[in-house]
Every structure is written in C-alpha cells, then in structure tokens.
Amino acid sequence: MIKAELDAIDLKILRELQRDGRMTNVDLSERVGISAPPCLRRVRKLEKAGIIRGYRAQLNAPSLGFDLVAFCMVGLKHQSEANLKAFAARTQEWPIVRETWMVSGESDFLLHCVARNLTHFQDFVIEDLTAAENVDTVRTMLTIRQVKDEGLVAL
C-alpha cells in the first residue's frame, strides 16, 4: 500500500529515476510516455512532497581505496530516548559510518561501515565505537561481496 497519492505515471517516474537519477527530463519523459513539460512538473511535485529526497552519485568505493564494507550491531547499556538519540547523534560524527539504523531485537543499532582496510576498521571499532559512552556490545560482520544493489524501494 502506497501512502502517497501516486498514479501509474508517477510510479514509472520514480522507478526510472531510481535506476538513473541523472537522465535528462526529455529521456525520462520518453521512458514514461508523456511529454517533457508535464514530466518535469510531476518530478518537481514529487520533490516538493519529499517523495524524492535528493540525488547522488554512486561511487565505486574500491576504486577510491575503500576496500572494506562491514556491519556493526551495537547494543546500548541503557535504551532511554535520550540515550538512543545521543548515540544516533554520535554516529553522525564518524565518517566511516555511512548509514545508521535503529533496530529492534538483540541490538539497538545497525551501522553500515566503509573503511580503507581491516586495520582502519579495527581502529574505529576499538578506539571509537566500543569506547563510546553507553555502548555495551558490538558485534561486527565483515562482508565478502555485494550480490545485489537495487534502489531502496521496489515499485
């Protein structure tokens, strides 16, 4: 069930932009089957509504010297709202952490980390993450390879 009031054309626009956010409006309009001016109006409306949050380049991390991707499951000693917010804010300061998710279950947070190498990652875990205030447990998972990379929403 989609919360926003979107028609079939809006969904096509979102699918296409999720595949290639850099295409021209003319190319997009051709792919979704409408002329360019109404296509641009629809895109602007989706942006204004916050459905399209932004655009960014997808970088090839290994070609830039970032060869390690890992996930950290972090459990806090205390889960009050203030403690959860404080830890979430702390993750904003760590460049190695690319995404932070508050989760339910055995852990409180799931961190997606990208590092230059294993030493860089280990230093972060030991010196920053486990040393952070209120952190109780840290479980790390090193990735072997990414097997799927799709947009975040299946439309």
Image: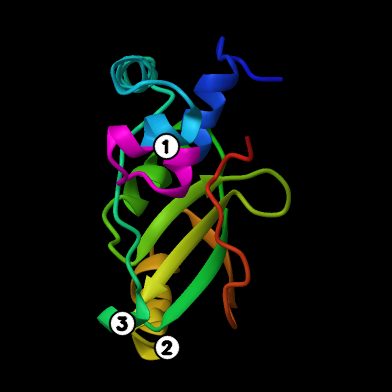
Does residue 12 lie above or below 96 as drawn?
above
Looking at the picture, which amino acid does disc 3 mark? Answer: Ser
Note whether residue 130 is visible. Answer: yes
Residue drawn at 29 percent across, 49 percent down: 56
Q: Which residue is mark 3?
A: 63
Q: Which residue is mark 1?
A: 85
Locate residue 102, reporting x and y percent: 55, 43
Does residue 122 lie above or below 139 as drawn?
below
Residues at circles 2 and 3 in contact by the CB criterion of under 8 Å = no
Locate residue 5, reporting x and y percent: 56, 9
- Distance between mark 1 and mark 3 Cα atoms: 34 Å
Locate residue 47, reporting x and y percent: 33, 22
Q: Earlier in the sequence, mark 2 or mark 1?
A: 1
Q: Neighbour class for label 3 at 10 Å: few (<14), some, many (≥20)?
A: few
- Between 99 and 46, the one lying in front of the other is 46
Q: Which residue is mark 2?
A: 118
Say which quarter of the image contains residue 23: top left
Looking at the picture, which amino acid does disc 2 mark? Answer: Leu
